[in-house]
Image (tube, helix red, strand yellow):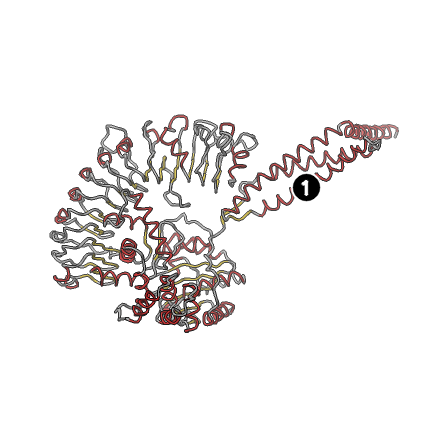
Amino acid sequence: MVEIVVSVAAKVSEYLVDSVVRQLGYLSNYRTNIEDLSQKVEKLRDARARQQHSVDEAIRNGHKIEDDVCNWMTRADGFIQNVCKFLEDEKEARKSCFKGLCPNLKSRYQLSREARKKAGVAVQIHGDGQFERVSYRAPQQEIRSAPSEALRSRVLTLDEVMEALRDAKINKIGVWGLGGVGKTTLVKQVAEQAAQEKLFDKVVKAAVLQTPDLKKIQGELADLLGMKFEEESEQGRAARLYQRMNEEKTILIILDDIWAKLDLEKIGIPSPDHHKGCKLVLTSRNEHILSSEMDTQKDFRVQPLQEDETWILFKNTAGSIENPELQPIAVDVAKECAGLPLAIVTVATALKGKKSVSIWEDARLQLKSQTSTNITGLTANVYSSLKLSYEHLKGVEVKSFFLLCGLISQNDIHIWDLLKYGVGLRLFQGTNTLEEAKNRIDTLVETLKSSNLLLETGHNAVVRMHDLVRSTARKIASDQHHVFTLQNTTVRVEGWPRIDELQKVTSVSLHDCDIRELPEGLVCPKLELFGCYDVNTNLAVQIPNKFFEEMKQLKVLDLSRMQLPSLPLSLHCLTNLRTLCLNGCKVGDIVIIAKLKKLEILSLIDSDMEQLPREIAQLTHLRLLDLSGSSKLKVIPSGVISSLSQLENLCMANSFTQWEGEGKSNACLAELKHLSHLTSLDIQIRDAKLLPKDIVFDNLVRYRIFVGDVWSWREIFETNKTLKLNKLDTSLHLVDGIIKLLKRTEDLHLHELCGGTNVLSKLDGEGFLKLKHLNVESSPEIQYIVNSMDLTPSHGAFPVMETLSLNQLINLQEDDPNTTIHNSFINAHGMY
């Protein structure tokens, strides 16, 4: 019993001693604990400020902030505010000491104890603020049109469609009407209102168009769902899209401009019968396609605008028409547009700002002088309206460019196709280089967009033309420039124009045709362009040997996607040919191309050839060689590339990679040193050791240079300068040319690097002044990205950074005050 009492007394004594020691410790360390808290909260305040920089930049770039980041910032703000008040109270208590009112020992003990506790909380909050990333890219949103004066008939139709959407029994809705009547605009408004009312968790939209491209439709839907495809095939992408859409409890899918029955399953769109939360809105010019082919349950017709609505839309677009003499003429002009918004807006835009009565009178006369177009869907009203807009384009160059856009494509128009054609036709006066021509194209595209003659697609490399605008362009080209066009037909000998008509033809354009047979030859002394687009690739076409003999002025020839057992012997007669496109062709020997001595642009995209003929070296005027997608290409004989000394653009994306050293039979990278005019380069180099130490890329304006063999050519960001480095020993293989590129790169990917703890130690203190996107992964040696101590004081490492991805960097020193993560990002505003 005595032993128990002694034991208990000892424990009590030990506890009391410890308690006294702790209390004495709080008293003796009072000043230390207060200063420690002050330092800890200052570090937290700095961390909070750094996080704010990242958040601000993320918001500026349209990103959404992660919820846990927002919660942490709120928690940190509240704690910092609490501590500041605590320290202020403690300061006031110390001031009282000088007045003889020092806090008693109990108060000092409590303040010291509270300070130590708060310091611990500060450390915990600071530690909790280490986020892998602060933001995420939100799914793309539809561009919303600016609000305008309400049009009564449109409001009524919109209300009817919205009422049907709210009806649980209806899951497929059709919207139909004339071309140019405003179906696309209406369903955009449907999408906006459905999103505002939160009727669905997701609202997505895609354009189907006259010739559906399933991959493009899948891509448009995926963008709005915030997903990226890893799959290449249509079937694989469809399966992924189907899975993603089924994850949404409710989803509205809008498919615009359907011309024929569409297999939704092939796209990856779930049936509303299986996904009860899925609803579809489909648009077409043909009600039968909607109700009979697509099984819509309720259809709504979009009628032309009433006269009063026509005038409202016209004057809103054309601007103020104050001259009383002009007003009645303007009203007549508006009436001639037949209530079709496409025509109304296009004409009003063309006449906007025009003050002369004579100009308006002439416009009225042109619109009243309507003749039948004999083109399905293109009414006389629409044609006259769009033609008027064309006539008001300023200058021959922009008019010719507009006609070219209408001539070469059924759906999307690729900017690089316009470059290849336009340069070959000498369309861009005053330009001497491909880069200058590309800049001119960008200017002309913006001009046509502002005239409502070209449409946005959301991608810089592609534009789109409304099919009625395209039909107008082709009719103008036919009437005024003797252009011969065939579309959606079987081409036979008897289908060509008469001999006397061929004498005048300047361009031949075949779209979506089955070419069964061609005449022995066409006598076309004025022909400058011959193009075949989206032809039936299942049919082999033997071009007669004399076919091109009488086309000596031909400047552009496009035989893309055709099966050609051989190229005709008469090809060598095309002594003025500047552009030749054989994209996706299944063709035998192409050696005869070497006889085209004036050739400047050779496009062999998606070719199945395994060897580029040595004779190509004879094309000494070649300025652009496009071999992208020619993944079977294994041999480019040594000396061919270096002989093409005028090359400005060499594109080998997803193509030739079998580079060898100098003196070997295959091409070597040293040949690039002979291309002094090169400004654009897409290339993959599997072995960094093959890079010559003295190679420079000073003239490159745009490039995609991949070093290593794991890279995908799929684009995530639209930038002009992309560099990807894989399995590179930065201490050995970072040649001067690559170092200089690093300073100009906008999209940089680094994978499995070795050779030092610093990713890039040779930046001369400048940092990544142009870098927008950085991805670093699977590089265990890396401790920091860039040592901020090496940077000049005036530079941050990443002043224009938009996105940063860091993965599998197990030794990255996030706590080192000199690392990029904690210093450079303060100046860079980047995200990670």
Give the structural element (helix, strand or loop) at label 1: helix
| 290 lies left or right of 37 | left
Instruction: Give the quarter of the image for residue 317.
Output: bottom left
Relative horizontal placement of residue 132, taking residue 260 as reference (left or right):
right
* Residue 819 vs residue 57, the one in the foreground: 57
Type of residue at label 1?
A: Phe
Residue 361 place in picture, x, y as percent: 32, 68
In percent of width and height, residue 126 lies at 62, 37
Quick one: 610 or 394, which is closer to the camera? 394
Task: Please identify the quarter of the rendering in which residue 686 is found.
Answer: top left
For residue 143, above or below residue 650: below
Single out the residue that lies furthest toward the top. 732
Residue 341 vertical position relative to residue 633 in the rendered view, above or below: below
Horizontal placement of 631 versus 121: left or right?
left
Q: Quadrant of residue 680?
A: top left
Residue 47 versus residue 139: which sits nearer the camera?
Answer: 47
Task: Locate the N terminus by quadrant.
Answer: top right
Instruction: Measuring from the top left, give residue 470's x and y in whole percent.
Output: 30, 61
Residue receiving disc 1:
79
Classed neighbour count for the residue bearing mark 1: other residues with Cα under 10 Å, few (<14), some (14–19), many (≥20): some
Q: Position of residue 287 (x, y in %)?
A: 37, 71
Count every numbered label the image shows and give the total: 1
